[in-house]
Image (cartoon, rainbow, N blue to C red):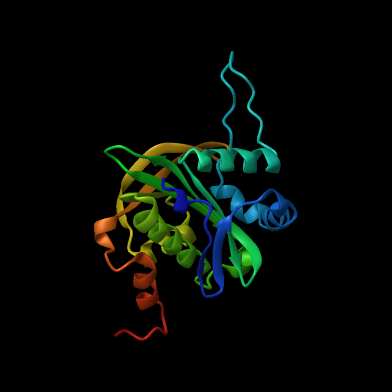
Amino acid sequence: MNASSWPVELVDGDVTLRPIRLRDQRSWREVNRRNREWLRPWEATIPPPAPAGPVAQRPTYRQMVRHLRSEANAGRMLPFVIEYRGELVGQLTVAGITWGSMCSGHVGYWVDREVAGRGVMPTAVALAVDHCFRHVGLHRIEVCIRPENTPSRRVVEKLGFRQEGLRPRYLHIDGGWRDHLVYALTAEEVPEGLLNRWHQARPGTSHK
């Protein structure tokens, strides 16, 4: 990851992606608390420990941010919060960044239910993907989504991600190992940029 790739702020209209900060704790906790039940079926959980294994604990907010920033500094992650009209409304992370002959990463995200359906999440994903392809140097981006998560699937389908198949029992979520659909996109598929594609596809946008 080159020096200009992190930290960085990405903006399109009312939507901003910026690095997560320790001082975001109050806003982040408030948004997460309000959306707890809405997000519960889709958020990763920690599986029960093996009989002789250690008991894992969910990190505190400060531990989470320090870990994310450490991974970002090591070139393995890009952790953002999402702002809409200046207010923190969610989180987007490009994780699992792999170099060498693969040059790929995967995107995970969540957003405040109050702004769902306003184009915030597709815009945020498009901003992140364009940054990864054009400035970070990645070639492929994946998004893995539970088949039942229709709103999240709509985000990537609106953006033109390809569905590549099913990963059985891929992640531990909401108390069990859950199947996930794999969506992917490579740099060659969006030479015009994903954000530009999204602008052209949005309802009410004139097509040239």
Q: Nearer the viewer, residue 181 or 85?
A: 85
Q: Which quadrant would the N terminus be assigned to in this image?
A: top left
Residue 160 shows up from this direction: yes
Q: Position of residue 163 (x, y in %)?
A: 31, 54
Asked if 63 appears above or below 143 in the picture, the reply is: above
Q: Position of residue 41 (x, y in %)?
A: 56, 48
Asked if 72 appears above or below 191 in the picture, the reply is: above
Which residue, as the protein is rendered here, is positioned at the far left?
188
Which residue, as the protein is rendered here, is positioned at the far front?
3
Residue 145 shows up from this direction: no
Q: Nearer the viewer, residue 80 or 144?
A: 80
Relative to residue 7, is residue 164 drawn left or right?
left
Q: Which quadrant would the C terminus be assigned to in this image?
A: bottom left
Figure disc tally: 0
Q: Position of residue 102 (x, y in %)?
A: 29, 40
Relative to residue 147, is residue 34 drawn left or right?
right
* The quarter of the displayed image where residue 191 is located: bottom left
Asked if 179 appears above or below 39 in the picture, the reply is: above
Which residue, as the protein is rendered here, is positioned at the far top?
52
Q: Residue at x 70, y 39 (%)?
A: 60
Q: Residue at x 52, y 75 (%)?
A: 13
Q: Position of residue 144 (x, y in %)?
A: 41, 48
Q: Residue at x 42, y 63 (%)?
A: 126
